[in-house]
Amino acid sequence: MSAPRSHEAHVAGQFGPQAAAYVASTVHAAGADLDRMAARMRAVPGARALDLGCGGGHVAFAVAPAVATVTACDLSPEMLAAVASEAARRGLSNIETQAGAAEALPFPDAAFDAVLTRFSAHHWRDVRAGLAEARRVVRPGAPALFADIVAPEESLLDTHLQAVELLRDPSHVRDYSVPAWCAMLAGAGFAVERVDRFRLRMEFSTWIARMRTPEAHVAAIRSLQLGAPDAVIGHFGIEPDGSFWLDSVLIEARASSVSEQV
Ligand SMILES: C[S@@+](CC[C@H](N)C(=O)[O-])C[C@H]1O[C@@H](n2cnc3c(N)ncnc32)[C@H](O)[C@@H]1O
């Protein structure tokens, strides 16, 4: 038996050594969701923005030119160091970094005018606590943008997705469906204003390399893919080499005021 460790240490152990790969990742570095986040932030000039679960920093880099400051927050010190270094290389002097867990943010109430998070919440041990914290640290009325991989609502497809995600990255917690996201956001005090869906092609060899997936797990993923029913193969567009398509979403919301929440 290996020594006990927290989920947060597990996540940081998965991501930390791969910080440079996440800065360089083309899947993460561009996308219509990032463009939309930057456009939304241009409507709030002077904002203090929070990038929650910043990873390689692509949200922070995209919105920094539009806002006063971006605080890039992540569990992984290595990710934060990579973000600080890349921000300096790009001349983005208004990005600061802060270590912290989404579920217990190290910021006072209403410290920010906007919160953004992308491809991170599916790793959070307690997503409801993380969303409650996101709501606590922004002022009422603040824009709140949530992008993540989403699960299909059909259980057959959902189970395949969660299985391959967990095999690829043992710190995976859950990809939520869009209705689940909307319900959790409402519960945390966010009013959903717009939902945009996207599809992302995962090139198999780079998808597993980014997480250093062990060979036995790669074989198990390939076995699941090869034995999958037509409905699964069709939905995820599984290709002969294992490359496939993920569904993602960008949910634009607004932090409700206390009177709106009752
Ligand atoms: C896939 S990366 C994020 C990608 C990045 N946001 C982007 O748009 O390119 C996921 C990040 O979430 C971070 N993370 C996971 N769970 C977290 C938590 N509970 N609190 C804060 N950060 C967390 C990980 O350390 C990792 O850096």
Image: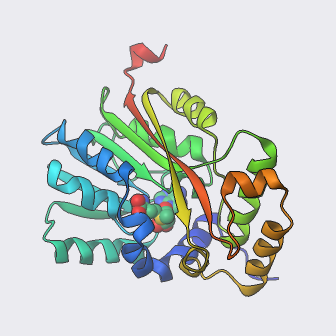
Residue 26 locus on image (x, y percent): 40, 70
Q: Nearer the viewer, residue 242 or 220?
A: 242
Q: Nearer the viewer, residue 96 or 252?
A: 252
Q: Residue at x 51, y 46 (%)?
A: 130
Q: With respect to residue 131, does 60 lie above or below?
A: below
Q: With respect to residue 74, does 104 lie above or below?
A: above
Q: Quadrant of residue 215?
A: bottom right
Residue 122 locus on image (x, y percent): 59, 54
Q: Quadrant of residue 227?
A: bottom right
Asked if one can make out residue 259 in the rendered structure from this viewpoint, the answer is yes
For the image shown, how many numbered marks are present on the structure? 0
Q: Quadrant of the N terminus?
A: bottom right
Colour basis = rainbow
Q: Residue at x 34, y 65 (%)?
A: 57
- As drawn, the residue found furthest toward the bottom would be 215
| Side of 122 where 143 appears, left or right | left
Residue 165 locus on image (x, y percent): 68, 63
| Side of 155 where 69 appears, left or right | left
Q: Nearer the viewer, residue 143 or 97?
A: 143
Q: Nearer the viewer, residue 117 or 133?
A: 117
Q: Residue at x 61, y 75 (%)?
A: 204
Residue 134 locus on image (x, y percent): 42, 42
| Side of 44 where 166 appears, left or right | right
Asked if one can make out residue 74 in the rendered structure from this viewpoint, the answer is no
